[in-house]
Image (cartoon, grey):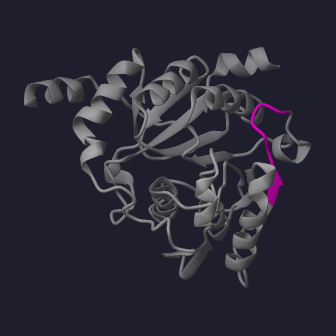
Amino acid sequence: MAGEEEVAEAEDVMVKLGSYRGTVRLVSGDPTEEIMLLWGIQQPTLSKHNAFVCQSSLQLHLDACGRSLSILQSPSSMSSPGVTGAVMWDSGVVLGKFLEHAVESGMILLQGKKVVELGSGCGLVGCIASLLGAQVILTDLPDRLRLLKKNVEANLYGDVKGSATVNELIWGDNLDPEMSEPLPGYVLGSDVIYSEEAVTDLLTTLLELCGTQTTIIFAGELRNDAVLEYFLETAMKLFIIGRVDQSQWHPDYCSPRVVIYVLVKKQNRENEDH
């Protein structure tokens, strides 16, 4: 195994993508190799599930950006098929703390930047981005907005560096002008890669929402290797993709069950879309 890992490391290509100032491992060629690396080296199934969240609780408490955030959850909604955005998942906590750490270390500048969050769920990531100075539009399906608005109102009080609004967004549908005019500097998402059907609609929305100057940052839990492989295979035709090493994450919020990708739209896609 050690020999295989050394070969994999030797073939890694480190690049800088978009507005993220750190380096990422370029994902190219056969996405099957990326899947084998993730499941072989990180071994997500052997690590603790929900290390940073408690989905049976009505609230999640998290310190971030100099204040104590209190995120309301709706555990009873989990009994409804397909409803996963009413509780927090590790990937959301990891992404939120990654953003805080990246801003503090100068890897990301969010102050004054337009940010659109996809599949905001309980709203933790968008709230943190707003506290870090971004002008955030948090989006989700119509039936998820009530809880999302509650959490934005409860946590973004007093002196907030940025701003936050909540909008309905169904992936694959036409975008409201305020989301795409002007195009956002960043698009964020946690656990947005969960089915092949959703991947198709997600990529349709990303193509409309992003220019080549937009930096996409996605975090996801390593559950379904087939769905992630499908996403990578399809997205690689449209975007340059890099994986962020855990050495660049918040040191207290790392998990072998989670992966973070940075994506940037390919230049030729920009030309074709216009």
* Residue at image point 76% right, 48% down: 141
From what the image shows, is residue 133 above or below residue 28? below
Residue 201 in magenta stretch: no
Q: Quadrant of the N terminus?
A: top left
Give coordinates of residue 186: x percent, y percent: 66, 46
Give coordinates of residue 126: x percent, y percent: 65, 60
Question: Horizontally, is 74 left or right of 232 in the view?
Answer: right
* Residue at image point 17% right, 23% down: 7
Question: Horizontally, is 259 left or right of 240 in the view?
Answer: left
Toward the viewer: 60 or 153? 60
Q: Quadrant of residue 169?
A: top right
Q: Residue furthest bottom?
A: 158
Question: Horizontally, is 66 left or right of 272 in the view?
Answer: left
The span shown in magenta is: 166-173
Q: Residue furthest right?
A: 177
Magenta stretch, main secondary structure, is loop
* Residue at image point 66% right, 25% down: 200
Total marks in image: 0
From what the image shows, is residue 85 above or below residue 149? above
From what the image shows, is residue 237 above or below residue 226? above
* Residue at image point 80% right, 62% down: 165
